[in-house]
Image: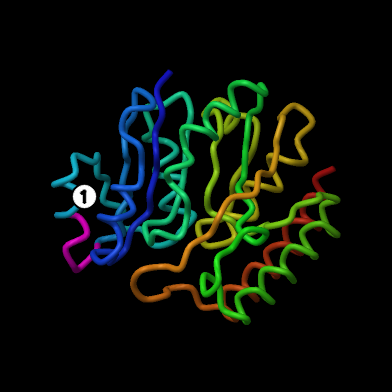
Amino acid sequence: MKVSIIIPTLNEEESIGPTIDQIPKDFANMEILIVDGLSKDKTVEICQNKSCRIIMEKRKGYGRAYKTGFKAARGDIICTLDGDTTYPAELFPELVQQLIDEDLDFITCDRLTKAEKGAMSPSHKVGNWGLKVWTNILFKTKLIDSQSGMWIFKKEALKKIKLTSDGMPLSEEIKIEMFTNPDIRAKEVSVPYYPRIGDIKLNTWGDGVGNLKFLFKKRFKKGQDA
């Protein structure tokens, strides 16, 4: 069983080293796959020094980076996280084992229930709450955190879904696709969420509005396709 850990990066020189160091190196036949959006700092150099496999992706977008990583991943199981130390990478062995033991196809990690103080701004909390509510209403899901970027899943599951977003909405789209597909066994697991190292790249209101628009567009297109 091979595991691919995918981290999209863009100018993360302050945090990418500590993020990689948090990943246990002996729990699986593992590769750490960095999909870098042409960083202008030392991000790529740091990843090279830590024996990561690196793909340079000139096309912009969070979703684009992940779709490139999914296609290139050599693992049977894919794990994802941001390169800013916010996610508990040390839990990957436990979560991979849970995926296997419970015969799941997809796990998404809820950040909101166990978030540490200072890990999320008040506006970020409000935005996450609103997007979660609309996701659950529009797609009849029961997610606690629709925007989490930490997932553990079998690569085979990607063949059963369709991902269209090249931007931030891919995070909510992959959950919608996994949780509404009757042939996929999906589960949400609560994990800690830590304060980040480095500058925040998320545009809370701009990205939030974009994600909300995507939800409605996807929902009504899904209805038309049905």
How far from the left and from the top, in percent, is residue 21?
29, 47
Residue at 77% x, 41% y is 180
Q: Nearer the viewer, residue 28 or 105?
A: 28
Colour scheme used in the picture? rainbow
Residue at 65% x, 73% y is 125
How far from the left and from the top, in percent, is residue 207?
57, 73
Along the horizontal axis of the image, is 198 left or right of 46? right
Tell me: residue 165, above or below residue 2.
below
Along the horizontal axis of the image, is 121 left or right of 220? left
In which quadrant is the N terminus drawn?
top left
User: Start and end of the magenta stretch?
Assistant: 39-44
Along the horizontal axis of the image, is 183 left or right of 193? right
Tell me: residue 76, above or below residue 90.
above
Residue at 64% x, 55% y is 172
Q: Hey, which quadrant is residue 117 in on the image? A: bottom right
Q: Which residue is tagged 1?
A: 47
